[in-house]
Image (cartoon, coloured by chain):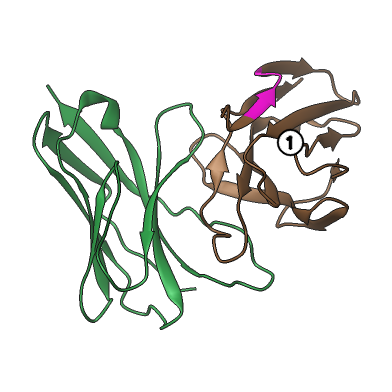
Amino acid sequence: DAKTTQPPSMDCAEGRAANLPCNHSTISGNEYVYWYRQIHSQGPQYIIHGLKNNETNEMASLIITEDRKSSTLILPHATLRDTAVYYCIVRAGFSGSARQLTFGSGTQLTVLP
Amino acid sequence: NAGVTQTPKFRILKIGQSMTLQCTQDMNHNYMYWYRQDPGMGLKLIYYSVGAGITDKGEVPNGYNVSRSTTEDFPLRLELAAPSQTSVYFCASSPGQGKIHEQYFGPGTRLTVT
């Protein structure tokens, strides 16, 4: 699976958009980009995933560059409850035996009042 | 939907004791997983299941057992608890069929072995 690189921490003002970057320069053609977050002491939460097109759901938007070597997760109006560690994970969509999600160190997003 | 539920939320075990961590999901997901997360560390897969009656080992299966008799339930059994099993245990499920990595997690069970 492709390695991902994320900044260790970011701050964002409440009400503003939070843009979390992720580099995955070795991504393969069949690998998806997944985003999860983990709020302190809670289970990880699935946010969104995409292959090559931009995706949007009720939680966030995912922008993937045309060459697929990087992506950005956008929380359009960050709230204090969005403070969490955000993980960018690259996995093949039809992984035969490796069902495990591998969470790296992620980005600690702190939303400031 | 309640999603993925886990019981108990907290438990303290003595060395050598046994216990079962319960996990139930009401989303009719085929795939279920057990992870452990040690303090300040990432998640490690213990066991997973792709459907009722089918289970397989993950990265760290030693000291644990699982069963999957129904689609909804995926209990994790700890036999002869050891201090190294002190951790937070998360159960997760996913729809499978191309959505293997779209996993939904329970709130976790915090286990201390002393």
Q: For chain A, what colour was chosen?
A: green
| Residue B70 against residue A56 in the figure, above or below | above
The local crowd at label 1, few if under 14, some if 14 to 19, many if 20 or more residues have their Cα within 10 Å, is few
Q: Is residue B11 left or right of residue B93?
A: right
Q: For chain B, what colour was chosen?
A: brown
Q: Is residue A77 left or right of residue B32?
A: left
> Residue A51 appears at what percent x and percent y?
36, 71
Is residue B82 part of the magenta span, yes or no?
no
Among the 4 quarters of the image, the one containing residue A53 = bottom left
The chief SS type of the magenta part is: strand
Under mark 1, the amino acid is: Ser
> Residue B10 appears at what percent x and percent y?
67, 17
Residue marked by disc 1: B84
Residue range corresponding to the magenta coloring:
B5-9
Q: Which sits in the foreground, B27 or A83?
A: B27
> Residue B92 appears at what percent x and percent y?
62, 42
Q: Which sits in the foreground, B51 or A31?
A: B51
Q: Secondary structure at mark 1?
A: helix
